[in-house]
Image (cartoon, rainbow, N blue to C red):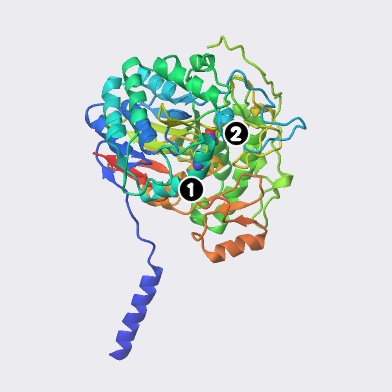
Amino acid sequence: MKIKLYFILFLCIIFSCKKEAPITRGLITKNAMVVSARAEASKIGSDILEQGGNAFDAMFATEMALAVTYPYAGNLGGGGFMVYRLNTGETGALDYREKAPLAASRDMYLDSLGNVIPNKSTVGAYAVGVPGTIAGIFTAHERFGSLPIETLLKPVIALAENGFTVTKKQHKRFMKYDSIITAVNGKTTLVNKDVPAQSTFKNVALAETLKRISKHGRDEFYKGETAKQLVAFLSEKGGIITSEDLALYEAQWRDPIRFAYDDLTIISMSPPSSGGLCLAQIMKMTEPFDVSQYGQNSLEAIQVMVEAEKQAYADRSYYLGDPDFVNIPVDKLLDHTYLNNRMQHFSFDKPTPSDSISYGTLPNYTMEIKDNISYQEHNETTHYSIVDQFGNAVAVTTTLNGAYGSKLYAENLGFFLNNEMDDFSSKPGVPNVYGLLGGKANAIAPQKRMLSAMTPTIVEKNGELYMVVGTPGGSTIITSVFQTILNVHEFGMTMHDAVNAPRFHHQWLPEEIRMEPNRFDDTLLEQLKNLGYTINETRTPVIGKVDAILILNDGTLEGGADYRGDDAAVGF
Ligand code: DON
């Protein structure tokens, strides 16, 4: 009898040891959903949908609600990208990336000896690119929106006037950036260390700006009172953006990057973001390997994925820039044979040294750069995903670049200005804040858009909407989106588990795999090191903050709101 009991106990122990981590689903809704960095913004977007608005109406309201509640990255003073898929299956992309001002020049961040001047492209008015966000949301709304702008902005203005509750994580960020924001502005701003968690945060100046935009429309920001105040403020602070720069700004419709991976079709952002193209290269190079057999975050899967990432980031640094200024060989870079050749030196025995990898050679291609287009022609980021009750989807990633952008806060207008100029290559061979290298394709020129890594992405499965996904994270954006898609598709994870899984990243140079600390098995880290990989767990302790929506088999929606932030899914 005793032996029998011991045997049962033994079986129980074995069974419980073998038990997999519990599978968790995120919020499930029947009709529609918004997932963003703040619950208030997701709620406003979802309410707009519930009032009968569509995904583009919700985009407008969510984007502005993030500017109120998430000044870290949500913005009027920055830019972004949107990828959409209508319920008819039509897809497209909108580029509302910032542009270099007319007075910008290739060497504007170099000293007389040709060295990059520290902080000049990252801090203060001289780092600011011409903002695109207001043009972006209005352009999307003009084509696809259905509710009046006043209706979309009403709850946002109320939120700015009545305030929202500061979260613990938000307070921490206020503390962290307080001294630099105060130094740049010469005084304490609304965003400062004395705003404790649980306090109510109001932004009356922003409410006033939004009221003017609600009344006068898009041109209020680019030609009206707001434009006047903005230009005066920037010039007083040493910036070079003029009223002409603002008046010239237009968002651009672009054809998204579209590619197949198994039975998925992936639609992602095209240049001037490198996101879609690099994602396509990485996924196509990974596709021939049976990563699902290797297992999620297994040694072999990481090796294959890292190799593909290195190859793609090497191409990025050479070939990619603003397509209005440089002829990007998109088809050649996505050619099947070309990508297979890129992986031919891959071995499971040891890493391919980064210094033996360069951009690939393409047949019949010569780079042509326009230095200056006649202007008569017409680091922090946040992502949100929306699916509406009509079956339309939008994926939007928007940014000020750095945390609170250039740290320059336009007090009378109630918003921060970006430091997106740092996404250009200030000097070939000198990395930007994300350690990314660039060459002449991404050199600064007046009116040019700086290369981005933002990767708002929509995935179809068997021709139907399947996933909406994206993330902040600078250079790690592309690889975070990549891992999230594989987590669902190859490793069978729920949307919730896929966005919350540990992440790693390689960008060719520097020669290291960045890994989130304390999230990977020690044995795995040892195995990687023994094979010759360099592991860096300190450079980017948080890799991405993914917000995504998955369409389940029964047609319901599952939200994935990353635990790394205050992100939240709201829907009905
Ligand atoms: O466009 C880009 O790639 C960068 N400006 C994004 C910056 C970013 O994601 C910062 N967030 N962590």
Q: Please tell me the numbered disc located at residue 457.
A: none
Q: Residue 404's spot in the image, x, y percent? A: 48, 37
Q: CA distance from mark 2 to mark 1?
A: 21 Å
Q: Residue at x 34, y 45 (%)?
A: 166
Name the kind of residue labelled 2 in the image: Asp
Give the quadrant of residue 411: top left
Q: Residue furthest front?
A: 187
Which one is nearer the viewer's eye here, 89 or 172? 172
- Position of residue 419 relative to residue 101, above or below, is below
Badge 1 density bin: few <14, some 14–19, many ≥20, Cα 10 Å: few
Which one is nearer the viewer's eye here, 228 or 354? 228
Q: Which residue is mark 2?
A: 422
Q: Residue at x 67, y 58 (%)?
A: 532
Question: Does ligand 1 reach within 8 Å of label 2's beta carbon?
Answer: yes
Which one is nearer the viewer's eye here, 571 or 554? 571
Is residue 465 at least partly visible in the picture? no
Image quadrant in which the N terminus is located: bottom left
Q: Residue 533's spot in the image, x, y percent? A: 65, 56
Q: Residue at x 69, y 47 (%)?
A: 354
Q: Please tell me the numbered disc located at residue 176.
A: 1
Closest to the camera, between mark 2 and mark 1, is 1
Badge 2 density bin: few <14, some 14–19, many ≥20, Cα 10 Å: many
Q: Residue 305's spot in the image, x, y percent? A: 57, 48
- Position of residue 130 relative to residue 437, above or below, is above
- Position of residue 197 relative to residue 518, above or below, is above
Q: Are marks 2 and 1 in contact (CB under 8 Å)?
A: no
Q: Is residue 237 left or right of residue 49?
A: right
